[in-house]
Amino acid sequence: MVGGNAIRGTRVGAGPTGESERGESAPRRRISYWCANGHEAQPSFAMEAEIPEEWDCPRCGLPGGQDEQNPPAAPRTEPYKTHLAYVKERRSDADGEAILAEALERLRQRREI
């Protein structure tokens, strides 16, 4: 039986491949970056591209630098703070007591009416 699906055996986006079809690729250079865990990443950059100072490690996510002996330090992550912790940073205990006393006084006045 002849016929059926004409695109059987192909994939979306399939087409002729090779340098002659895509054009010449830009000349590239590979730069090594090392993270604090000792992992090496070697991304490639175009020859005329500006090389970044740091590159995130694809294995652990830490920043990596070009100096293998002195990689950048891991960023310090701040612990999660609750709303109460932020309030305590802005207000002292005396301020809290004064605000509470004021609120209670207003509540008592409303109840008397």
Image: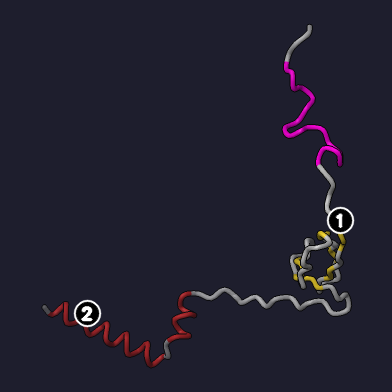
Q: Residue furthest top?
A: 1
67 in magenta: no
13 in magenta: yes
Q: Main secondary structure of the magenta part?
A: loop
Q: Residue at x 77, y 32 (%)?
A: 14
Q: Residue furthest left?
A: 113
> Height in image: 44 above or below 108?
above
Residue 30 x/y as whole percent: 87, 62
> Pointer 1: residues within 10 angstroms few (<14), some, or many (20+)?
few
Q: Secondary structure at mark 2?
A: helix
Which amino acid, by three-letter code, is at mark 1?
Pro
Determine the CA span between mark 2 and mark 1: 75 Å
The answer to whether 69 appears left or right of 57 in the picture is right
Which amino acid, by three-letter code, is at mark 2?
Leu
Residue 110 x/y as whole percent: 16, 78
Residue for badge 1: 27
The answer to whether 97 appears left or right of 42 in the picture is left
Q: Kindly indicate the quadrant of the structure image that contains residue 66.
A: bottom right
Of discs 2 and 1, which sits in the foreground?
Answer: 1
Q: Residue at x 86, y 58 (%)?
A: 28
Residue for badge 2: 107
Q: Residue at x 50, y 74 (%)?
A: 82
Q: Which mark is residue 16?
A: none
Residue 90 x/y as whole percent: 44, 86
Chosen colour scheme: secondary structure
Name the residue nearer the viewer: 26 or 96: 26
> Height in image: 5 above or below 30?
above
Q: Residue at x 82, y 76 (%)?
A: 71
Q: Kindly indicate the quadrant of the structure image that contains residue 70.
A: bottom right
Q: Which residues are magenta?
A: 5-22
